[in-house]
Image: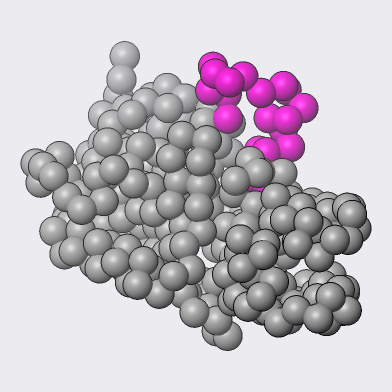
């Protein structure tokens, strides 16, 4: 990532006589977020850029100068997308559907065809390209290290129909069998678990503290507060400890895929 934007932000902050902490307070951001932007490790979301402009009295300069992302995503996911591309370890928990970086084209297309709010065909195509580009993270055989913890509901929801979900499940099996991802299933029989109300992504990096990203209906948030991130890590570890072992998880995936393949 070019550091031009970060250099511009730092120059504007210093011209205003503000420290990173003072700017963070004024812009309702964290100091670490400001530091990462200035160092060129991140770009702000559109809303962050607008807040920076207001805090620095720079009109719409920082908003207008914000580079356009080639990848199309919902606005609330923009910050998480940038982090995902830099992460060395990614741990996903999915409650309702397969995480984006693990989706097949057919499954991703079906997810994006949700009946409400209906996206235009052009916007669906843009987001589909993004989804498939994100999956290219797995082309590197080593990094990032990826863990996928799936609630059994993910396997049972027939997104796209029997053929599409069977292909998706077999894709997951292939990734796990090749050793590219570590995969575990939280079975229905487990009942309640500490991640039951969340979709969660945990990310670690070489040169910055870990973060957590949580998502709900049209809402997503990157958590950087160390105590909050640690709580989510503990929740993930607790749930993982109650999940099926890899071999049993793969057996469940295979049997589920077969049931869809033989669906009449």
- Specify whether residue 175 is in view: no
Occupied quadrant, residue 82: bottom right
Query: Which residue is at 17% across, 50% downward?
Result: 193
Residue 37 pos. (x, y %) = 71, 72
How many marks on residues?
Answer: 0
From this viewpoint, is residue 42 visible? yes
Q: Is residue 138 left or right of residue 173?
A: right
- The C terminus - image quarter: top left
Range shown magenta = 112-133
Image quadrant holding the N terminus, namely bottom right
Residue 117 pos. (x, y %): 58, 21
Q: Is residue 170 above or below residue 58?
A: above
Compared with 59, 14 (above or below) is below
Predominant SS along the magenta part:
helix
Q: In screen coordinates, is 237 left or right of 128?
A: left
Of 195 and 7, nearer the camera is: 7
């Amino acid at each position: 990532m070019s550091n031009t934007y970060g250099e511009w932000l730092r120059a504007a902050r210093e011209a205003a006589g503000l420290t990173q902490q003072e700017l963070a307070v004024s812009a309702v951001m964290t100091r670490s977020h400001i530091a990462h932007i200035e160092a060129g490790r991140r770009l702000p979301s559109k809303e962050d850029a607008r807040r920076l402009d207001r805090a620095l009295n720079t009109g719409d300069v920082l908003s207008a100068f914000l580079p356009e992302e080639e990848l199309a995503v919902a606005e609330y996911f923009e910050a998480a997308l940038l982090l995902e591309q830099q992460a060395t370890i990614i741990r996903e928990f999915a409650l309702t559907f397969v995480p984006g970086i693990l989706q097949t084209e057919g499954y991703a297309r079906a997810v994006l065809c949700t009946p409400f709010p209906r996206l235009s065909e052009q916007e669906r195509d843009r987001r589909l390209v993004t989804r498939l580009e994100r999956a290219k993270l797995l082309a590197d055989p080593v990094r990032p290290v990826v863990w996928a913890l799936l609630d059994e509901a993910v396997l049972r929801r027939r997104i796209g129909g029997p053929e599409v979900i069977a292909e998706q499940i077999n894709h997951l099996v292939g990734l796990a069998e090749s050793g590219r991802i570590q995969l575990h299933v939280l079975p229905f029989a487990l009942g309640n678990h500490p991640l039951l109300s969340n979709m969660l992504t945990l990310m670690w990096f070489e040169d910055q503290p870990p973060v957590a990203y949580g998502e709900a209906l049209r809402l997503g948030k990157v958590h950087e507060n160390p105590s909050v991130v640690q709580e989510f890590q503990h929740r993930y570890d607790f749930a993982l400890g109650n999940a099926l072992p890899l071999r049993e998880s793969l057996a469940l995936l295979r049997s589920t895929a077969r049931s869809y393949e033989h669906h009449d």
